[in-house]
Amino acid sequence: LEHIDDPNVESDTAAVEMGAEWRRSDEQTYRLGAGLRHSDTKDALDDTKYTTFYIPAGLTFDYRNNELDARRGYYLNYDTAPFVALSGIDNGFYNKFDLRGYRSFNVGDARATTLALRLQLGSLAGPSLEDSPSDFLFYSGGGGTVRGHDYQSLGVQVGSDDDDIVGGRSFLGISTEVRFRTKGALGYVGFFDAGYIGRESYPGKSGEWHTGAGLGVRYATPIGPIRFDFAVPTSNNNGDNNFQLYFGIGQAF
C-alpha cells in the first residue's frame, strides 16, 4: 500500500508482487518478478484509475570500491517493467537505466582527486502521454537529478499555466563531480548537473533541458562522508528558489 503526494502528482496504490533475486556474486544481482497493481492518480491532465499486470525485472552490477565514497570502479543498475493494462490506461514498457563511473588520480602532492560521472536514462514506451500511468512518468529537479532546481520542477507543460505540468515519457540525466581530498577529514566538490524531460518515449528535440551547478564540502567519518552541497540553477529555472541546499551521508552518487 502506498500514498504519494509529490508536487505534480498525487496517487494511492495497492499492489501485490512476487519475485526472485539471484545474487550471482557480490558484484552482480539479477531480479525477476510479477505483480498486480491498482492506482488512483491525480495530476494536471486528469483523475485516473487504472489496473495493470506487470513483470518487473532488473540487474545491478556494482564494482565500486566503496558504496558511500567510491574512488574507482563503476555501478550499473537497470530496471524494466512491461505491463498489460487491465483497465484505465494502455499497455506499455517502462525502462530506467543508471550508470556511474569513477576514476582517481593524483594532482601534485595532494591526495587522490576523483572524477565521478553519472548517466541516467528513462523511457516509457507504448501509451500516449495522456494514456500513461501518472506515477510511471519522469520528472527532473532535486538531489537525485539536477541540483539547484526545485524538486520535480521540470516536466511537460500541458496547460496555459506554468504550473500545469505532468511527467514526461523520457528522461535523460547527466551529472559530473570533481572531488578534491585534503590531508585532513575535509574534502571539496565541484559539480554540474543537466536533465532532459520529453513528451516522446526517447530523448529527442521536443523536450526541455535544465542545468544546475554548485560546490560542496565533505567531512570524512567512519560510516562515510557527511555531505553538504550548495547549488544554483544555471538554465531554465521553473521553480520559486534561486538556490538549494542538500545534506546527507555518502557522496551524491
Image (cartoon, rainbow, N blue to C red):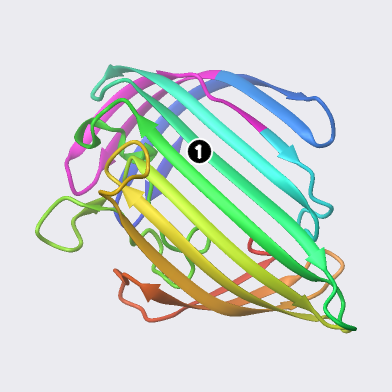
* As drawn, 146 above or below 199: below
What amino acid does circle 1 point to?
A: Lys
* As drawn, 68 above or below 168: below
Secondary structure, mark 1, is strand
Please check the rendered image and state whether residue 56 is part of the magenta-colored stretch, yes or no: yes
* As drawn, 34 above or below 127: above
From the top left corner, tell me how far across and down residue 108 is, in percent: 86, 82
Residue identifier under label 1:
96
Please check the rendered image and state whether residue 129 is part of the magenta-colored stretch, yes or no: no
Q: Is residue 192 visible?
A: yes
* As drawn, 136 above or below 71: above
Q: Judge the density around disc 1: few (<14), some (14-19), many (≥20) Cα neighbours within 10 Å.
A: some
Q: Is residue 189 left or right of residue 53?
A: right
Characterize the magenta stretch by its predominant secondary structure: strand
Q: Which residues are magenta?
A: 34-59
From the top left corner, tell me how far across and down residue 207 is, in percent: 29, 51
From the top left corner, tell me how far across and down residue 236 is, in percent: 31, 70
From the top left corner, tell me how far across and down residue 215 is, in percent: 59, 80
Identified at 73% across, 37% down, the residue is: 61
Place residue 238 in its image quadrant.
Answer: bottom left
